[in-house]
Every structure is written in structure tokens, then in C-alpha cells.
Image (cartoon, grey):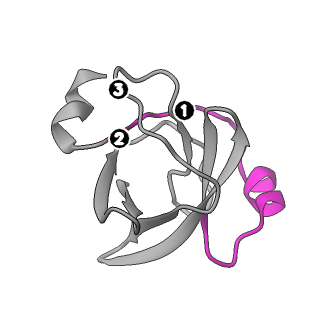
Amino acid sequence: MKYRLYDPEFGDMLYGINAKFAKGKNLIRMVFTGLSIAPIDFYEGDIFWYQKGDKWYAGFVSQLAEDCFVLMPHGDSLESVLRNCINFYVGNVFSNPERMEMY
């Protein structure tokens, strides 16, 4: 599943690769911005959009550490996300789809 992040202040769409992340509501949710060639900045409370089936839904970004974030669908709690995630792997987020090939 792919996800996109939307910055309402600038109107930018950001694109994420499929990270090998634990299954929680079939959503790829952990992103780590510290390893990519040109990492983007996330902030606590940023809005993101995620795809389930043919529909897009909104959620928000929750920061766990300096470069580690969880994508939280509305209605989720961090406790439930961590409880439902068995293995933690990380992916990177890029500003456009072409950069995804660089990783």
C-alpha cells in the first residue's frame, strides 16, 4: 500500500515507498526520515492521506523520536498502534515519485 503526505501550508504532496512494516489495519505507518538522500521534514500533527481500497482517508503524523514518525489514522491511539505492530521496520519518504527509485 502506498501513502501520500499533504502539507496544508504549502499544498505539497509527498510520496512514500512501501516500508516493510508490521500489519496494523493494513496500513504502512512507520516512516524514518533520517536515512534518505534528501529526507523531508515531518512535524507532529502534520496531515497525511492514506489509501484503503479505492478511497483516500486523512490522518495525522505522530513523532516518536527525532527522525521517527508514525502515521496515525483519525480515531487511532498510539497505544493501539504499538500494540498491534509486531515487527518494526522503516521506510523513507521522498518529495516526488522519481526519488523513490534512489533508495
Q: Which residue is mark 3?
A: 38
Residue 35's place in the image compared with 80, above or below, is above
Q: Which residue is mark 2?
A: 17
Residue 4 on the magenta span:
no
Q: Position of residue 91 (x, y in %)?
A: 47, 34
Count the numbered circles shown. Answer: 3
Q: Position of residue 23 (x, y in %)?
A: 59, 51
Of label 3 and label 1, which has the lower sequence position? 3
Which dot marks residue 100?
Answer: none
Residue at image location 20% in from the left, 43% down from the top: 97
In which quadrant of the rendered image does the N terminus lie?
Answer: bottom left
Residue 92 on the magenta span:
yes
**In the drawing, does residue 75 fall left or right of residue 100?**
right
Q: Position of residue 96 (x, y in %)?
A: 22, 44
Measure how far apart labels 3 and 1 are at the Cα level: 16 Å
Q: Which residue is mark 1?
A: 90
Residue at image location 52% in from the left, 60% down from the top: 26
